[in-house]
Amino acid sequence: MSETEQGRNDRARMGMDEVTEPALPGGDLGKNEAILTRHRREAMRGIPLAVITWALFFVLVFLARRYRLLNLSQEAQDVFMSLAIAWTIAQYVYFRTSLCQRMMWSFGSADRGFVLGHGLLALGFVWWDGFSLFGVMLMTLLVPTTTAFLGLGAGFGSTLFVGAIVQAIVWVTYQLAPGEGKVDGLLFALFWCAWLVSWLIGAITNGNAQSKKRLIAAMLRAQRDNHGLIERQTRELDEKSRALELANGRLSRLSMVDGLTEVANRRRFDEALHEEWRRARRAQLADQSAPAPVPYDAMALLLLDIDYFKQYNDHYGHLAGDACLKQVAATIACAIRRSGDLVARYGGEEFAIILPATPLAGGFSVAERIRRMIWDAAIPHAESPLGRVTVSIGVADVQGQDCGGETDLLRMADGALYAAKRAGRNRVAQAVFEVSAPTGA
């Protein structure tokens, strides 16, 4: 037998198909145990009602016995009362122990079976009493109680079905009862109609209660399903948000990187230059104890231009020119050793390098290293007088006497760059226009 079929059999045996909260197929033991406990608790609620009903029945029987209102002998009365007590004890033992789990009947079927047993005992008592007036009055007491008893686990159809059977049995037993001491037929018919109305009212009441239970269970299921849907949608939204964040991060990085050379682009250079300039400015303003104005904190800027690059493009073509730009950018990046330094493509064949916390002499040394590494790369250039790709570099720093802002720093580095070109290219020049002699050329 498959696990699914076993689960259906377990639910049918425990009466779980009669409620609107089914157990999980395949044996979710925790949930099955919870539903079993709930069914057992509901079935056990009928036992106090049975005890109270029979106690009231016995009190009335004892009163009737005192005033000799019953046709049944005292010994027969004691037998019926003993049977009622034994049946109630059996009902308690069945639902209180594991017997209810081992038997083949569902909780609902067993519950209605015990209720029917109580009803048959009462009906038997009245029948053996010969349907006396007092016995019929006892039946009038028991019918509404029985409908309420059934209502613990039955709906409209179940209650009406049991009521029809009971009413038919009562009518037949009345007709078969001996005539001596029997209540008048018209009076019995009135009582019988009253019992029928009681069954109908009980069926409607039980049906409404069962409908409310089903509605509540359906609402709980819908709430659980909605909660699961919300959790799934929340997870999906979180995943999409993370994917969007990653995509935005990639886009942000791409917006700051030159697509050809894969170094920083002009936009990133402008932002970085502004940030470093403000940092240098704050370093100056932080020192308030100096007796004289303190120069800005050291920061060097290098502007680099590839010599005779237009002629390189004209001779080798633009694809070769792109390859040359990539190689030059990679060489510059290798020459920069600190993580805080920035290499950017400034435009065309020009590159810019920001060196924070670097004085003019340090910037000049780095520029010379870059120029030497590009010379050593020996990239062929047939249109250059030197036969290979070379660069000219201008160096400026924020401590220059004429440096009053970012624009002045760029202007000074650009002036140094053109001074290097005018001096013959393949050179490094600083903003004070001291030009280095070409080495390794």
Image: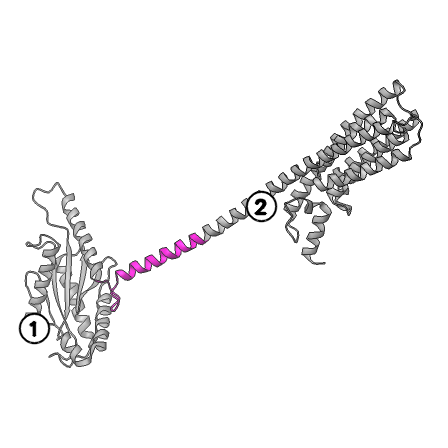
Query: Residue at left 82%, top 22%?
Result: 60
Q: Residue furthest front?
A: 186
Identified by mark 2, the residue type is Arg
Circle on res. 424: 1
Residue 277 lies, with reference to residue 418, above or below; the image says above
Circle on res. 221: 2
Please name which of the two marks, 2 or 1, marks the residue nearer to the observer: 2
Q: What secondary structure is marked by label 1? A: loop
Stretch in magenta? 236-265
Density class for disc 1 (Cα within 10 Å; few <14, some 14-19, many ≥20) is few
Q: Quadrant of the C terminus?
A: bottom left
Main secondary structure type of the part rendered in magenta: helix
Query: Residue at left 65%, top 37%?
Result: 208
Query: Residue at left 14%, top 44%?
Result: 285
Task: State whether residue 333 appears in this view.
Answer: yes
Queried whether the magenta region covers residue 237, the answer comes back as yes
Please report contact status of discs 2 and 1: CB closer than 8 Å, yes or no: no
Circle on res. 132: none
Judge from the rendering whether residue 207 lies leftward or rightward of residue 416; answer left or right.
right
**Percent x, y of residue 419:** 6, 67
Q: How many marks?
A: 2
Q: Quadrant of the N terminus?
A: bottom right
Front residue of 81 and 373: 81
Density class for disc 2 (Cα within 10 Å; few <14, some 14-19, many ≥20) is some
**Percent x, y of residue 274:** 18, 53
Going from the N terminus, do you reach mark 2 or mark 1 first? Answer: 2
> Residue 426 falls in which quadrant of the image?
bottom left
